[in-house]
Amino acid sequence: MTPRNVRLALLLFPLIPAALLTVLAQRTKNVPSLDLVKPELSCTQPPTYRVGYQREDNGLTPQGSGFHFQGLSWLQTDLCSAGTLLVTAEGQVAAGAAPELTFMLNSKPLAVESFDRRKTLKLKIPEAGRLTIGYFNDYYFMNARVANLDGFSLAQSACRQLDIHVPKGAGGWYPEANTAVLVSEIPATLVPCGRGRLKFYVMGREARGAFPVLLFEQNGQQLLEKQTSAQREFVQLPVSRGPVTVKLTNPFVGPIVDRNLDVQKLLFIPAPPHTKS
């Protein structure tokens, strides 16, 4: 999965049915706890940098002689002496804020530096230890018209099986939450095992002044055209055996706002022996 698709999936995945749309807001800034136990060091010079944590795949990737941060993540390396760290980086400002790097030595804060343009930071490292370089203020927002359908069930039928398929590009299907998310005109398919009443809830996210409109069809006949709103609404449809298609009739995806950071160079200069940095 590409980084963009990973982010889209994270944005679309619902947290709970009553607040499905909160996932399209700013991504959480909660940072996983760091280990406070003083580590055993394994040093090299120049230092070897490794990914300590990334919230999603490809959130932190090597790029040339540096690294590309596009999700909450951090690098780690072991330094066996005091010295000076030179960091050359360039950030992409989003939502009025520049990306920041947080520097910690043995889990103790050293500095927080923002990068709204290409610049080089000169950071004093006071002693040997494990250095963590974290990117904790990631931001990603997609202004899109999104329809959420959840709580699917088939009633008044001799069977209960209901198969749901949301193709690539249409949105996403999350079986654990019994929820489908639609963002395009590509139809999703609901396949009841027999005649009955298809029950579910719908909810929409407004974009460009309008909420999503959903069109349900079976056997070439329109079952329902549903205007969604910010309120979760109950829907039930009389259906027969066979596929029911549902699609957005008014999709909209606006500009994506994405805060990222390119660290182009990391250079550690050890302090001379018997000299405190």
Image: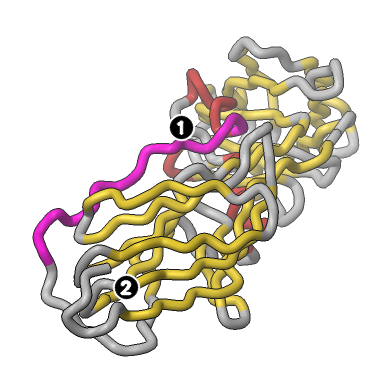
84 or 130: which is nearer to us? Answer: 84
Give the x, y percent position of residue 21: 59, 26
Residue under pointer 1: 15
Q: Amino acid at mark 1?
A: Leu
Q: CA distance from mark 2 to mark 1?
A: 45 Å
Residue under the point 83% across and 20% down: 225
Check if residue 247 falls in the magenta segment.
no
246 or 153: which is nearer to us? Answer: 246
Residue under the point 44% across and 37% down: 29
84 or 213: which is nearer to us? Answer: 84
Residue 208 figure quarter: top right
In terms of sequence position, does the residue under pointer 2 or pointer 1 come before the other? 1
Residues shaded magenta: 24-38
Q: Secondary structure at mark 1?
A: loop
The circle drawn on residue 83 is 2
Give the x, y percent position of residue 193: 59, 42
Judge from the rendering whether residue 179 lies leftward or rightward of residue 182; answer left or right: left
Residue under the point 79% across and 26% down: 214
Q: Quadrant of the C terminus?
A: bottom left
Judge from the rendering whether residue 103 lies leftward or rightward of residue 254; answer left or right: left
Nearer the observer: mark 2 or 1; the answer is 2
The circle drawn on residue 217 is none
Q: Measured along the vertical axis of the image, is residue 60 above or below residue 212? A: below
Q: Secondary structure at mark 2?
A: strand
Give the x, y percent position of residue 167: 71, 54
- The secondary structure that dominates the magenta segment is loop
Residue under the point 63% across and 29% down: 148
Judge from the rendering whether residue 125 lies leftward or rightward of residue 59; answer left or right: left
Task: Tell me, yes or no, if residue 224 can be seen here.
Answer: yes
Q: Amino acid at mark 2?
A: Gly
